[in-house]
Amino acid sequence: MSKLCITTISDTVGRTPLVSLSGVDGVSHGVAGEILGKLEYMNPGSSIKDRVAKHIVAQLSAKGISKSAPLVVAGPGNLAISLAMLGRSLTCLLPERTTTDRVRLLKSLGVTDIVRTLDGALPGSPEHACEIGRRIVKHRAGSVYIDEELGDWDLSACYDELAAELIEQTDGTLDALVLGVDTGNAATHLSRALKAKLPNIQIIGVEPTNSAIGEQTVDNPLARRWLCEDIGRAYAPRALLPGSIDMWIQVSDRVAYSMARRLVQGGVFAGPSSGASVAAARMYAVSACLQPSSRVAVILGDTARNYTDTLLSDDWMLAHDLLDARMVADLQRTQIEQYRAASIEDLQLPAAVTVSENDSMHYAVALMAEHDFSQVPVTGPSRRLIGYLTLSAAQTLLDNHVALPTDPVRKFMLRFNPAPRNVGSANIRKEYWLITPETPLSELSRFFESHSVAFVTDASRKFCLGIATKQDLISFLARRHTFR
């Protein structure tokens, strides 16, 4: 077998890149030293927890626990994803704040038992994940409870490997390590391993604003709320040994999410907890007055791809006030101001050419070819718009003899569905969006984020008045810029 072929997915865990973040907007400005990102999200399961899962699986095997033994796993979801990726059957205990993206990924990995737990529940309370997990294990013979926070698993070797990689990749020149803190295991073991080789290194712990880890205090946990996942606790985790952290930095949700978006824009696809860590690294670098030769490494432990409904959604970010002022201004300029109240009427579209649902496939294809159309609207009774037919689909159907030239268009057209989508329906329909000449171009631009063509109708959707594509928008902006 070729040396380039790796036999198991677990063999790909680790050896993640260490890259300079100087090209990311807002990271290096005014900072004398160099900020480096350890891309732990490039592990096969897209998080640092792949390292943890690999070592837990090895310890399970060493204890003689069968691979088929069900696991009950507590945590924000990344450890559960990693264990499922390694072929383990499990029940997952997830905090309420965990994104639906992780839930979907877990389900696609075969995890069907997902239990949501209360954010901020204190150890010993019935609502805490540990207590819920123990109750589940008690009633499931042969199951094993896995919770990093309890310290039941020896993770020293796991983080020794990570520390060795950092030292090797920086040639032993590393002034500080910045990482988000949750269970405390990574902070404890990395601090121990790195300080054994680099006694003067500073370990900077990062937590969200309202988290209580660095404070070492306990108050009302339900009053401590934040959105950033994978970091922070309403109490100090017992796996975090005193003295492991040299400095604590709290980062607000807005700063964390805005920095994460800047990382994505800079080609670093890291999640909100990584955004918090990079923002904290910048804060530390500025306050510590680093020398030009100084190096600060940041653990980027999770991928932005786990946050399509949150971090990567402009609407969600705006609704939760998580974009900084410059990002809000850029978004407003992109979505609204560049169109300056223009509507579809300003595109000056040519009148629409349509076919009837009773016209033949041959006629529809010939019409599209004659006018150089890639699609044509289809009308029903009283010339009402009911759907459309694309040239590529029609030609494929005819070439493969699925459709006959004499077949009516209604047999193969894509129909609009004016009613709410029926999941159990066998008919495939295209959900209809009402678009009129008065529709603002800013709304049309958002429509094109998920559609290739817009059919413009009157308000009653009786007549098709024109067809618009993203190219029409681009041409409009080009004309406006030319005559500005």
Image (cartoon, rainbow, N blue to C red):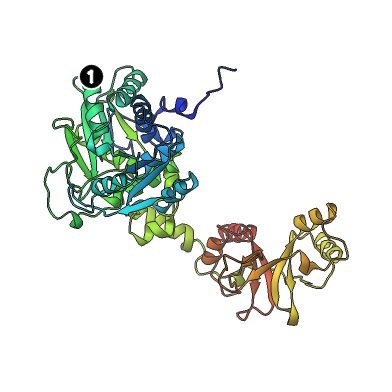
In the picture, the quarter occupied by the N terminus is: top right
Check disc 1 and report its element: helix, strand or loop: loop
Instruction: Using the image as rendered, state which of residue 16 and residue 276 is in the foreground.
Output: 16
Q: In this figure, which residue is indicated by the disc labeled 1?
A: 198
Snapshot quadrant of residue 303: top left
Q: Residues within 10 Å of mark 1 (few under 14, many from 20)?
A: some
Tell me, yes or no, if residue 335 can be seen here. yes
Snapshot quadrant of residue 472: bottom right
Instruction: Using the image as rendered, state which of residue 336 and residue 145 is in the foreground.
Output: 145
At which x and y percent is residue 202? 20, 28
Identity of the amino acid at label 1?
Answer: Leu
- Residue positioned 82% across, 56% down in the render: 402
At which x and y percent is residue 432? 60, 70
- The tally of labels here is 1
At which x and y percent is residue 227? 30, 52
Instruction: Using the image as rendered, state which of residue 134 and residue 404 is in the foreground.
Output: 134
Instruction: Using the image as rendered, state which of residue 328 and residue 18 is in the foreground.
Output: 18
- Residue positioned 66% across, 63% down in the render: 428
- Residue positioned 19% across, 49% down in the render: 234
